[in-house]
Amino acid sequence: DGDLPVVGMQVHQRQTIAEIPQLMSMKADIYVLEADAGGVLEGTLAEIVVEAHPDVTFEGHVRRMAALARRKSRFSPVQYFEIEIELQRTDPERMKPGQRVRATLMIEDLDDVLTIPREAVFNREDGTKIAYRQSGRGFEPVEIILGPAALGRVVVESGLEEGDRVALQDPTRSAQPVEADETNEPTGLQAPGGR
């Protein structure tokens, strides 16, 4: 019934009384959104940060990835891939079983690229991608070609330039004033580092 064993309690054959974790060979189980799991393969490099000790980063790689995405909760339609990270080293002083971690997976390592938020990308009926760039007359649609995507951001290979300001909402459909993305100032360059 979930009660912990106590002295004098009757136990049954093969009943688990206690578990002792092997702290020198721990792993990290992480969940990646189905939309962000493209490109994740066995062997993909990873960086793990234990939330209780955010100043220390542990390196590892993907050891196993679930074949199918699943919901973490039956009350939410969002699906995740469960991924097991094998750590290069563990630190029993900082790591305890069940602690929360943050993981960064190294899909691609890109230098000197231009990125914009995903919500600044819009689809035309013909399938082309556009962004609304701020100009003297408001916002004008600009056709863009996209590259790799990171969490919340996407690489723009052509169509925009360093320092451009883009709308986060479609100005042709919104009745409210549209604000430009302040994160692109002053340069607009943000390297996702393949993360």
Image (cartoon, rainbow, N blue to C red):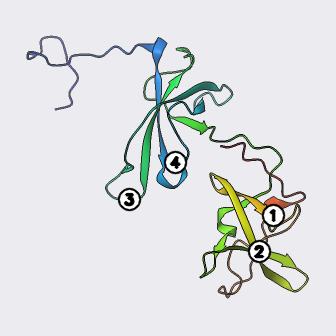
- Residue in the foreground of this view, choosing between 52 and 50: 50
What amino acid type should be assigned to the residue bearing mark 1?
Glu
- Which label belongs to residue 66? none
- Residue in the foreground of this view, choosing between 8 and 41: 41
Describe residue 146's horizontal placement relative to residue 2 as left or right: right
- CA–CA distance between discs 3 and 4? 18 Å
Packing grade of label 3 (10 A; few <14, some 14-19, many >=20) is: few
- CA–CA distance between discs 1 and 2? 8 Å
Task: Give the mark nearer the N terminus: 4 vs 1.
Answer: 4
Residue 88 x/y as whole percent: 57, 18
- Which label belongs to residue 76? 3
What amino acid type should be assigned to the residue bearing mark 3?
Ser
Quadrant the C terminus occupies: top right
- Which label belongs to residue 182? 1
Residue 69 x/y as whole percent: 39, 49
Residue 129 x/y as whole percent: 67, 72
Task: Give the mark nearer the N terminus: 3 vs 4.
Answer: 4
| Residue under pointer 2 | 179
Residue 114 x/y as whole percent: 80, 56
Describe residue 148's horizontal placement relative to residue 77 as left or right: right
- CA–CA distance between discs 4 and 1? 28 Å
